[in-house]
Image (spheres, rainbow, N blue to C red):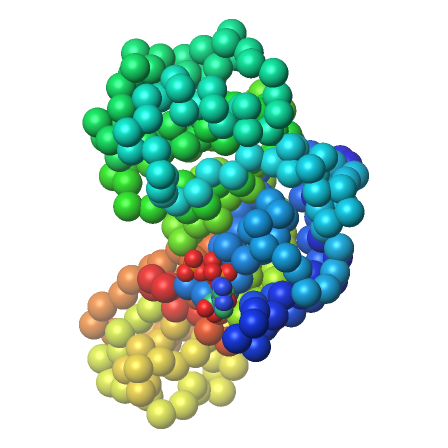
Amino acid sequence: MPSIISVRGLRKSYASGHIALHGIDLDIREGEIFALLGPNGAGKTTLISIICGLVTPTAGQVMVGGRDIIRDYKAARRQVGLVPQELHNDAFDKVLATVRFSRGLFGKPRDDALIEKILHDLTLWDKRDAKIMELSGGMKRRVMIAKALAHEPRVLFLDEPTAGVDVELRKDMWRLVRGLRETGVTIILTTHYIEEAEEMADRVGVINGGRLVLVDEKEALMHKLGTKTLTLHLARPMEQLPAALADWNLALKSGGRDLEYLFDARAQEGSGVPALMRQLEALGIGYTDLSTRQSSLEDIFVSLVHSGDIAPGEAMAGKGGGQ
Ligand SMILES: Nc1ncnc2c1ncn2[C@@H]1O[C@H](COP(=O)(O)OP(=O)(O)OP(=O)(O)O)[C@@H](O)[C@H]1O
C-alpha cells in the first residue's frame, strides 16, 4: 500500500529548549486507520501539528500526498483535515454556515450538495440551523468532524476524538470513523484509550518522550495478546522457585506470596496449566486462591512507557493498569 504521509528524521525543539520530537520516522498508508498512543506530553500533538502545518519543525521532512509541508505548504495542507479536541470560536455560528465556511477557507468552490451529504452522514442535517452553543457535546464533536471534512481531505486527523464522552457516544464515534475510512479517507487518531486503539486501528504507534517506541499492525499485537497470566496465591510464601519448576515460565511475585505463570493461551500444545497444577501438587505446594488475566495492548503500552523501548514479547509480562 502506498504511503500517504511520510515523515523522515523529524525533530522539534521549542524555544524553551525542550525537545518534543527526537527524530521521528513514520509512514502512514493510504486508507488505514492509524492510532497514535502516548501519555501526556509524549509529543502526539506536536507531531500532528507539524504534519498539519501548524507548527514548524526544527529538522526533518514531512510529505503529505507527495507534497512537502514546508516547500509546498498549501497543496499539502489542503489534503489534511484536523479535528481538534475542542471548538474555540464559533459558539454563535450556525452548523450549516460554519461547515460551509470551513470549505471556503481552503479556497474550494461552494458545494452545497457535498455539505448536505456530510451533514446527513454525521446526522447533523436536522441541526443545520442550530447554533453551536445549543448543541450537546456529542453533536459539537460531529460538527468538528464535518468542518474538517468540508474541504474533502484525503487524511483526517482526530485528536482525542472521544476524550470525555460517554461509552455510547464513543461507540457511535467509532462507527462513524469506520464509515469514513470506507469512503477512502485515511485516519490518524491520537488517543489515551487503549480500548479505542484495539477497537479501531489497523496499526498502532506508541510515542513516548518524543520517540516512536513501537509501530505495529494491530492484528500482530493482538496475536501477542494470546499471552495470559495465571496467578496462584501461595498457602506458604516461597523464597525461591524449586529446581523442579525451573523449566516452567514462572516468577515469584509479592515477596514470594504469589506464583505467576505466563503462558500462550492459543498454543497448539495447550496452556500447560493442568500439568503445572499436577506438578505443584506432587511437590506439596499449596495455594489459597488463583486468578487468570489476559494480557492486553494496555500491558504493552504501559510497559513501553515505563521502561523505554523493550520488545513487546517482554512487555507481555508487565502489569496492566491505567496511565
Ligand atoms: N509551545 C510549546 N513550547 C514549549 N514546549 C512545548 C510547547 N508545546 C508543547 N511543548 C512541550 O512538548 C512536549 C510534547 O507536548 P505535546 O503537546 O506534543 O504532547 P502530547 O503527547 O500531545 O500530550 P497530551 O496528551 O497531554 O496532549 C511536552 O513536554 C510539552 O510541554
> Where in the figure is residue 151, as x and y percent of width and height?
57, 25
| Left or right: 219 as drawn, with respect to 193 | right
Seen at 43% across and 87% down, the residue is 242
Nearest the eye: 158 or 14: 14
Q: Is residue 267 visible?
A: no
Quadrant of the snapshot with the N terminus? top right
Residue 322 sits above or below residue 50 on the image: below
Seen at 63% across and 66% down, the residue is 12
Residue 305 sits above or below residue 4 on the image: below
Residue 146 sits above or below residue 195 on the image: above
> Where in the figure is residue 80, as x and y percent of width and height?
61, 36
| Left or right: 77 as drawn, with respect to 290 | right
Specify the farthest residue to the top.
113
Residue 57 sits above or below residue 304 on the image: above
Q: Place residue 31 in its image quadrant.
A: top right
Q: Is residue 250 visible?
A: yes
Nearest the eye: 318 or 36: 36
Seen at 21% across and 27% down, the residue is 134
Q: Place residue 173 in its image quadrant.
A: top left
Seen at 66% across and 60% down, the residue is 57
Quadrant of the snapshot with the C terminus? bottom left
